[in-house]
Image (cartoon, coloured by chain):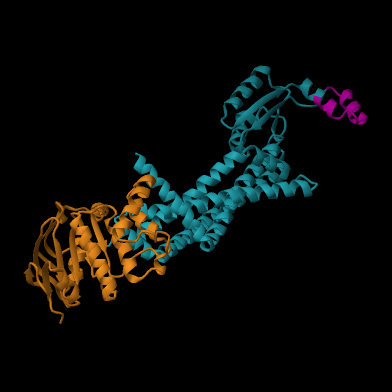
Amino acid sequence: MILLDRVTKTYSKNLGTALDRISLHVEPKEFVIVVGQSGAGKTTLLRLLTREERPTSGKIIIGGIDYDKLKDKDIPLLRRKIGVVFQDFKLLPNKTVYENVAFALEIVGVSHKEIQHTVPKVLDIVNLTGKEKRMPQELSGGERQRVAIARAIVRQPKILIADEPTGNLDPKHAWDVIKVLEKINRYGTTVLLTTHNAEVVNKLKRRVVTIQNGRIASDRANASYAQE
Amino acid sequence: MRRKYTTLWRIIHTGIVNFIRNASLAIAAMAVMIVTLTIVLFSLIANATFANTINQITSKIDISVYLKDTVTPAQSSQLVAQLQKLPNTQSVTYLSKDQVLKNFIQQNANNQQLQSAADATSNPLPATIRIKPRDLNKINDIKAFLDKPAVTALESEPTSYNGSLKQAIDNITHATNVLREIGIIAVIVFAVVSALIIFNTIQMAIFNRRDEIQIMRLLGASTSYIRGPFIVESAIYGLLSAVISVLIVNSIFVAASSTLQATTFGLLDIGYAVTYFDHRFWKFLGMQLMVGILIGTVSSVIATRRYLKFKIK
């Protein structure tokens, strides 16, 4: 599902290498946690996957799409196949919960009828039924993150990338968000989660990839992680 | 197909919503656009009106060639034929001595003394060829022909060019040309200024919505989907400005024709201008819409092209 082969990313000579020959293979329906300190290269890795940045060298193939052959104008098509959740939610502040989720469908030209049919179902998955008409600023951080997840999965992507989704949340809300991610994974979506929350990692008991100074330090199934 | 239609409608809808939310910025952009379009319209109408005035005066002007009594009918008809072949002659009329006298008597029906003087002598008036030129500015072609020795040999007196009228027409033509140039320059200057202001407005709108644009990008919105609403928005500036400019010109004419008793204002024949505008109202509206929408879309296409580029390092 995700294949990285000796991927290197250098921003500039002074800054050194952000990622150094990273090779990673994620199977379909897998749930992978990427851990590492701030600045270890987690975010760079995800930005390469969403094609916000290009690797300096190396090969990336996601869901059968070879990034070397991907033209700039086809990037929107790629992003429609990947759901992304951000630490800072990135919800549209002037749209309601429902509209925020519907927005992801609107921009790809889904009909009004289909949107009306799909959005409530997705809001149910993330346990937000009844809050459709709230504005993002009226919600708690955990609720906002679940709106963002709903938006990411509403187009039924094969891959969901979550960049520190619990970073701004207290433990209780963080766990609500993680439970939703597990649920989505059970439905068959590959999930790639970055975090530095040891509690989350240890509770999940999934494959853990540790990144240190731009390299993969360890890659273990059912692993735990001790916070530095 | 249906999907495309849905997307197109969403782009237009977003554009309209953004236009309304952006109202304060839109007013500045539209004000300049309205001035531009009003000037365009006024210059067109003024131009047509001046052209009409000149035409009216020009039609009263002709060149008279006075022939010697010794000229034979064959010679005169040959001369007429030659004159008709000149590119700038509209009509050439030959008047025999008798006809000239008849016209003279008619024209001076009230002047007994002149009439009796004409009767007393045996017709002193020369046979005349009247030439109506097509374009007064090119009268020299005809003049050159008439000044040939072969032709002057047939003339009894120097050719009459209605000199003073020609001078007046030259003045009007000159004034019109200057006004037209000023009009064109004003149109260009204002069109550029309004394009720049729209450019700026769209740029500010892009800046204001940069978070939203970033989110749209990350969700996989195509560039045209992001760009579309901005172009729709500035097309609306053009559309509304066009309608308003036509309404302004219309109400000025309505006011002018009801308050001004005189139908002319200097050289500007307001009566003619009003009918000219009224007859072409829909054509002008269509033209203004086209110009306005063109200025709007072109400037926003450039603005969005510059600021909505994909930037991948």
Picture quarter containing residue A48?
Answer: bottom left
Q: Nearer the viewer, residue A35 or A221?
A: A221
**Vertical side of B71 occupied by B41: above or below:** below
User: Magenta segment, principal secondary structure?
Assistant: helix
Q: Residue at x 60, y 25 (%)?
A: B84
Q: Nearer the viewer, residue B158 or B23?
A: B23
Specify start and end residues of the magenta stretch as a single range.
B103-122
> Which chain corresponds to the colour cyan?
B
Counting from the top left corner in percent of width and height, residue A170 is at: 29, 76
Horizontally, residue B267 falls left or right of residue A37, namely: right
Horizontally, residue A134 falls left or right of residue B169, namely: left
Q: Residue at x 7, y 67 (%)?
A: A221
Horizontally, residue A14 falls left or right of residue B166, namely: left
Identify the colour of chain A in the image.
Answer: orange
Counting from the top left corner in percent of width and height, residue B173 is at: 64, 46
Q: Hey, which residue is sitting farthest top in the picture?
A: B74
| Camera sees residue A10 | no
Picture quarter containing residue B77?
Answer: top right
**Vertical side of B14 occupied by A37: above or below:** below
Q: Hey, which residue is sitting farthest right in the picture?
A: B112
Counting from the top left corner in percent of width and height, residue B22 is at: 50, 61
Q: Is residue B114 magenta?
A: yes
Counting from the top left corner in percent of width and height, residue A122 is at: 31, 55
| Camera sees residue A24 | yes
